[in-house]
Image: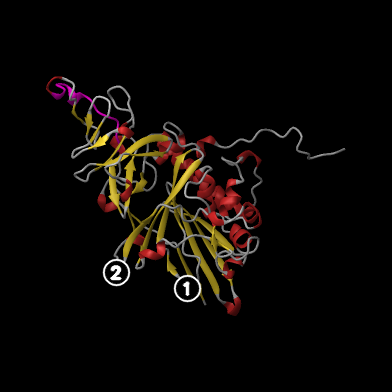
Amino acid sequence: MLTGTAYGRRAASHNPELTLVGAGTPAGELLRRYWQPVGTAGDATTTPRPIRILGEDLILFRTRKGVPGLLHPNCAHRGTSLYYGRVEDDGIRCCYHGWLFGADGACLDQPCEPDGGRHRDRIRQPWYPLHEWAGLIWAYMGPPDRMPVFPRFSIFEDLTEGEELVADDRSVGSGGPVIVDFNWLQHWENVMDPFHAPILHGSFSGVQFVKEMGVLPQVEWEVTEHGVRSIQDRKLDGGRIYRRRTQVVFPNLRVVPNPRLEVLGAADSIGWVVPIDDTTFRIYSVFRTRDPEAIARIRTLFDGRPWAELTEEEHQRMPGDYEAQKSQGDIADHAAEHLGTTDRGIVMLRRFLKRQIDAVAAGQDPVGVAFDEQKALIQLDAAAFMVE
């Protein structure tokens, strides 16, 4: 008798509590408790820009006085999109009847109403507070009474002469397109999967980083104050050990040291895996560097060429992170997984995520949010170095 065939296989299913990000969903409410990057500083101009984040469609702009704003797109008057609005000194004006809204959503003018709108102060266009830092624009989309102070990160403190922070919005680390077309979690949890590196990046598709990354590591995982950390030891010739510490930091930060051996030491970048909606995301990164132009050249290469230049046959022959994770499905089929001992970091991350979701649902604050500037520093220790 035949056994184990695909006949009658049940439909794919995932854990919606961990994957879905819309307003009111468990993970969506957690992500909204933190400041999230929504664009680069250059994305906010006097031309209204539509953006989508956490399943919400919004309009980003910058007043002619230089103040950025992020508003719900449909005018509070009768719903015309502010995408067609005109940005002025103090806000954005709807094209239909001219209602003017400030960056904080306040209605400043109703030109068709007597006296410019005698009760305009009662109208508020839905909006989100913004913060500019390191070349990115950040939004807080959670409950107003729980808005934390903007965090600081230890690896970006105390810049030396010639160093600066440089932003990048091209999804560095995804191994694929800028807008990545599957669920955010299956990429983020990949950071806690060091065993894919020697297979996918070290042999199956050739040496994508350096040959030392192809050595099967000895790995320990640890829960930290702000997430999960892996410590990887690769035994090299001559008795040397190549040690790497990588981190996931809540709610969606990936802190991965440079895989090139000529760049040892503390990690010099952080990537934010920002869900656009349930099946797309984008990675915004901040780099600490003395050479800003080098950041623009960072992309995973396959046979010396960037991902976008490969043919379909080459994508099949030389898969990278994108192909491996996208092929899991738009949202990975969690119920069909058979996790092993080397997946311990994935399990730890998911359990940590569930604890933070439960904390928010219980009315508590999740890890890593602070309401006092003195407590806003997040300590990171991701690094790569040689142990003799």
The image position of residue 266, as x and y in percent, is 42, 66
Q: SS for tag 1?
A: loop
Q: Which range is magenta? A: 116-128
Using the rendered image of the protein, determine whether residue 151 is visible from the camera's viewpoint.
no
Q: Toward the viewer: 249 or 366?
A: 249
Q: Residue at x 60, y 57 (%)?
A: 196
Mark 2 Cα within 10 Å, few/some/many (few <14, many 20+)?
few
Query: Between disc 2 and disc 1, whose residue precedes?
Result: 2
Q: Toward the viewer: 261 or 41?
A: 41
The image position of residue 292, as x and y in percent, is 36, 64
41 above or below 277?
below
Q: Which residue is mark 1?
A: 262
Residue found at the far bottom of this picture = 238
Residue found at the far right of this picture = 1
Q: Residue at x 24, y 28 (%)?
A: 124
Instruction: Tell whether 238 sits left or right of 38.
Output: right
The image position of residue 30, as x and y in percent, is 41, 39
Q: Which residue is mark 2?
A: 160
171 above or below 4?
below
Disc 2 marks which amino acid?
Answer: Thr
Secondary structure mostly taken by the magenta-highlighted segment of the chain: loop
Disc 1 marks which amino acid?
Answer: Glu
The image position of residue 152, as x and y in percent, is 31, 54
Residue found at the far top of this picture = 114
Q: Residue at x 52, y 42 (%)?
A: 183
